[in-house]
Amino acid sequence: MDYIKEYNRFLSSNLIDEESKKELLNIKDNNTEIEYRFSKLLDFGTAGLRGVMGIGINMMNIYTIRHTTFSLGKVILNEGEEKRGVVICHDPRNNSDKFALEAALTLCNMGIKVYLFDDLRPTPELSFAIRHLKAISGINITASHNTKEYNGYKVYWEDGAQLSPDMAHKVHENMIKIDVLSDIKIMEKDEAVKKGLLKIIGEDIDNIYLEKVLSESEYSKYTIKHKDDFKVVYTPFHGCGYKFVPYVLSKIGLDNIIKVESQMVLDGNFSTVKSPNPENADGFNEAIKVAKKNNANIIIGTDPDADRVGVMAKDKDGEYKVITGNQVGALLLEYIIMAKKEKAEFENNFAITKSIVTTNIVDEICKKNNVKLYEVLTGFKFVGKKIKEIEEEGIYKFIYGFEESIGYLKGSYARDKDGIVTSMLVCEMACYYYDKGMDLFDALNCLYEKYGYFDELTESIYMEGLDGEERIKNIGVKLRKDIPTNFSGTNVIRVRDYQNHIITNLKTREKEKLNEVTSDVLFFELEDGCDIICRPSGTEPKIKLYILSKGSSVKDAKYKSRKYMKSIKEMI
């Protein structure tokens, strides 16, 4: 694409507002910036759009919002489902409310009904609302845990899960065919309401959604019992969890919910943190100060769209340490199973899901407790798809799913990860162990003693810039051309190539078909029971490396994780 020509086309277009043109004139001498903004369309992946806010076809702005929404609307019209409607919500980011309204009014002008939330809402509530309202689709304006410069556009389908690759491809094809500077019109809000095309929704949906969340409680008797002496520090990182998390915790009996007041403020600049990502320990600096002051037992934090949860707990030395996404996920699974058994509610047809890059201790927990385990590709849309398949087959009952990147869901009322229900369950679980004189680190040690010693290590290698995508792609090409046969002297026994749908046994050289959705993932199975996975991120310019280790002790498992991470990094 001739990016200079595209830049000048925007500058001369009567469809671009004057303020946007001023922004473009400010970069007229910055060729690198012009190239970044106008060399390609903002990619529509299987999760939708995510990009830096600004004017350009590779940026998040009202023109790319209208263009993408119009492309989605064409798919909906082709399906003949415009009357079922589209549910739209947004997070607290700068411009999110404006982008949500632009998307709504674009669809209304196409004759497509829209249910628009009256204010910001958690991502899982959108997933729930789509199915509750029997809508055909949903849009969430959010960039999840990215820094303040970013915004995003997540698209969901009628099952409440993010778009399948096939449906995402249809939207993408429309985006290519339709010019960004097409005269895509929007309807006036008052007219859309008057015509019955725009319906504002809010508290009624909240109440039903929260009832579903609370119905997933397992053991509120322990939170009620320890309501006076168990203390929880909570931060929403300036986001959507600010209202619902304290509400559900109070409903299960917890009185000592200590909020990080500076981060309870809705703020699209996320002014108290470098990044509003509860996976990063440094994001909890303010929360740790509050926790130490109040001698709290645990800290929980939800990201800006409240679908992810980070957890810290106080150790024996009084220090607050991170419990990783893998560890929280495994602990919650064990807690749910134990609670079901203690209450005589355990059934032999229970099923759970985890992503392929998630801890292998889950396999052992499921084997020893007669729980069906389904492994899915990375991305919670694949969990959502699997829930639908499980329910349609009618053999197993889905109870829980998670992925290592601090995303969890108990129950099937939603088809995306839910930070509200997870916050509730983590607090319940912590009180359950507290009642036994244990903290979450004690519980984790018991888990290892019962099921084996596992460790996980994840690293992201960023490759930003215009050539970043190509450099990331070349890593996969290199590893497929010369398949590694060992890592640090440990033989690889099998390689799963999710892009070419092939499993190769390196001992016998036999190949078998891998029946999965196409994804640029390479999965190396080692002879000592450890796994190494390499995959590009679906939302950021980086390649992600995962080590799933098993050892004779925690120390041994951690040693293997570090050893194999060093080995794969040297190869790429």
Image: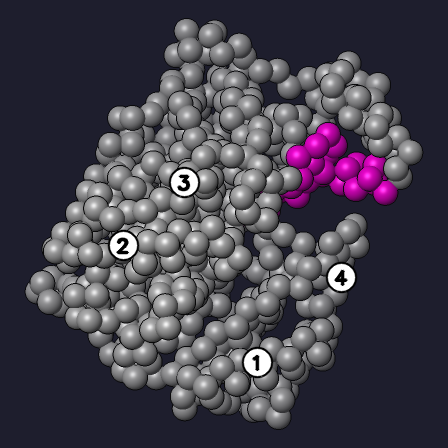
- For label 3, the residue is 261
- Label 1 neighbourhood size at 10 Å, few (<14), some (14-19), many (20+)? some
Does the magenta portion include 39?
Answer: yes
Nearer to us: label 4 or label 3: 3
Q: Earlier in the sequence, mark 4 or mark 3?
A: 3
Q: Nearer the viewer, mark 1 or mark 2?
A: 2
Residue 176 visible at all: no
Looking at this view, is 89 or 91 the one in front?
A: 91
Q: Which residue is mark 1?
A: 562
Distance from the alpha carbon under mark 2 to that under mark 4: 47 Å
Please name the residue that numbered disc 2 is placed on: 231
Give the colour scheme shown: one colour
Q: What secondary structure is marked by label 2?
A: loop
Amino acid at pointer 2: Lys
Residue 504 spot, x, y in % from top left: 57, 80
Residue kind at label 1, given as amino acid type: Arg
- Closer to the chain start, of discs 3 and 1, is 3
Coordinates of residue 160 in the picture (x, y in percent) = 38, 41
Q: Secondary structure at mark 1?
A: helix
**Are circles 4 and 3 on residues that touch, CB within 8 Å?**
no
Cα distance in 3D space between marks 1 and 4: 24 Å
Instruction: Answer whether labels 3 and 1 touch (C-beta < 8 Å).
Output: no
Residue at 52% over, 38% down: 142
